[in-house]
Amino acid sequence: MIISAGFMALASPAQTMTMDECMSYAVEHSVSVGKQENALDNARMNYRESVASLFPSVSAGVSASTNFGRSIDPETNSYTTVTTFSNSYSLSASMPLFAGLRYVNGMRAAKVARARGYSDLQVARDRVAMDVMRAYIDVLYYKGAVTIAGEQLAEARMQLQQAQALFDCGRKSAAEVAEVSSQEANYDYLLTEQQNNLAMAWIRLRDAMNYPQESTLDVVDCGSSEIVPQDVHEESVVQHALAGNVKVVSSELAVKEYRLHYLRAKGAWFPTISLSAGISTNYYTNFDNRYAYPGFSSQLKNNRGEYIGVSMSIPIFSNLSRLSSVRSSRNALRNAELDLAATRNAVESEVVQACGQMKGYGMQYNLAMKKLAASQLAYDGIAAKFAEGLVTAIDLQSASTTLLQAKSDCLRSRLQYMIEKRMVDYYSGVPFVQGEN
């Protein structure tokens, strides 16, 4: 079984993906994006239906009947006992001429809804890409944390061997050896903890990508090791986000759509004028005397009739349904306006926060690198002295803890800078997934 598992592992190597590739995969396979695409297709169909409502509606009808026993003779309009057959044909068309602009506003609202569907689709894509980005960064962090913990554990094991050798020579006490052994056990525990955190991070990343959990996956760190904090013009990023970000655009289209729905509801108070036209004919025969009436073609021609008419329907009372519809539409419009204001405020806050955090994490990373260099020098010096028996295990543990914290701070601040920089780029107009608008 072990040999078979080894061959299977060799046959299916882990697929290595960059952050952009993970986001593209997630957007392509996302369930929420697929549902939004279906919603967009519904919006397209609703728009086509609203456009078609402006055109005449045409219908045709055919009927046939047979009478047995006593019936009315259509020629003499008197009762007779015969067996007859009759059928009729009709073609009619109707078209609204004026309905308080309800059909026009409905078409305009459907068109806005279709445009809003495109924006909502992009919002769904951006949301999925953002979730994947954060999950991807978590994987990178815990991969780095596992590496750091592994290095510290290897160093602690080497120091434990040194302490044991010094103890054998009588230069270290049993308490100091126990202290170093405790530190080695602590790093062993830390490594196991970070490995578990990494395993959970992998699960969250696959879940965010909708990637099969049983498939192997690997990621690469494409971030730069040198970070120069950028002086971003915060106001210009805010103005660009408020003018073109898809969340703001979607909210603006929602206000426009609900305003048109409100106008459409108000149009129900106006009279409706309709135009109708049609043509009809019929055929009749007596089975007892087939020659008593003209033939089929002659009757269809002679019995043909046409009509054209204009009708007007004036609304007077409809159980307050029109009033309720107008008020509901007005409230929906007010809610959309409130949502737009909230969305603009949220986007502005997100931009200001992203710009500030990007600058702050960039400065933290550069300071953390200086701290790491100093901590590494201090640790190397104390480790050398510990090997000579000149310092205690407590001094070594303190230097090791400081070095571990410095490495963790460098890793965390660099990855957080990557996230915030990507967010600033997003609000500046750079999409998460290239090639999408």
Image: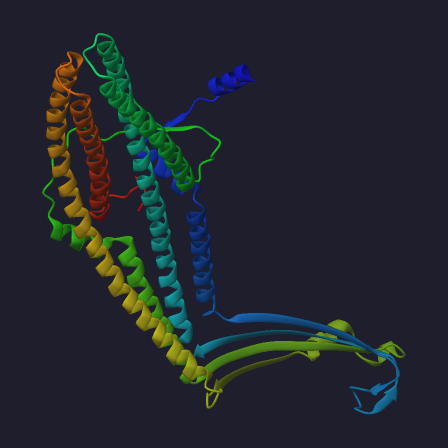
Q: Quadrant of the N terminus?
A: top right
Q: How many numbered discs?
A: 0
Give the colouring mode of the picture: rainbow
In this rendering, is residue 313 above or below 231? below
Q: Nearer the viewer, residue 430 or 373?
A: 373
Q: Nearer the viewer, residue 231 or 370?
A: 370
Which of the 4 image quarters holds residue 4?
top right
Residue 271 in sight from this viewpoint = yes
Q: Position of residue 308 (x, y in %)?
A: 54, 81
Write the residue at 39% across / 36% down: 200
Judge from the rendering whether residue 413 lies leftward or rightward of residue 203; answer left or right: left
In this rendering, is residue 393 above or below 214? above
Judge from the rendering whether residue 244 lies leftward or rightward of residue 75; answer left or right: left
In this rendering, is residue 230 above or below 223? below
Q: Position of residue 195 (x, y in %)?
A: 36, 29
Write the residue at 37% across / 50% down: 124
Q: Residue furthest top?
A: 169
Q: Nearer the viewer, residue 68 or 327?
A: 327
Residue 435 in sight from this viewpoint = no
Which of the 4 image quarters holds residue 286?
bottom right
Q: Position of residue 428 (x, y in %)?
A: 20, 47
Q: Position of residue 119 (x, y in %)?
A: 34, 54
Write the residue at 38% across / 56% down: 117
Write the residue at 32% across / 70% down: 335
Which of the 4 image quarters holds residue 360?
top left
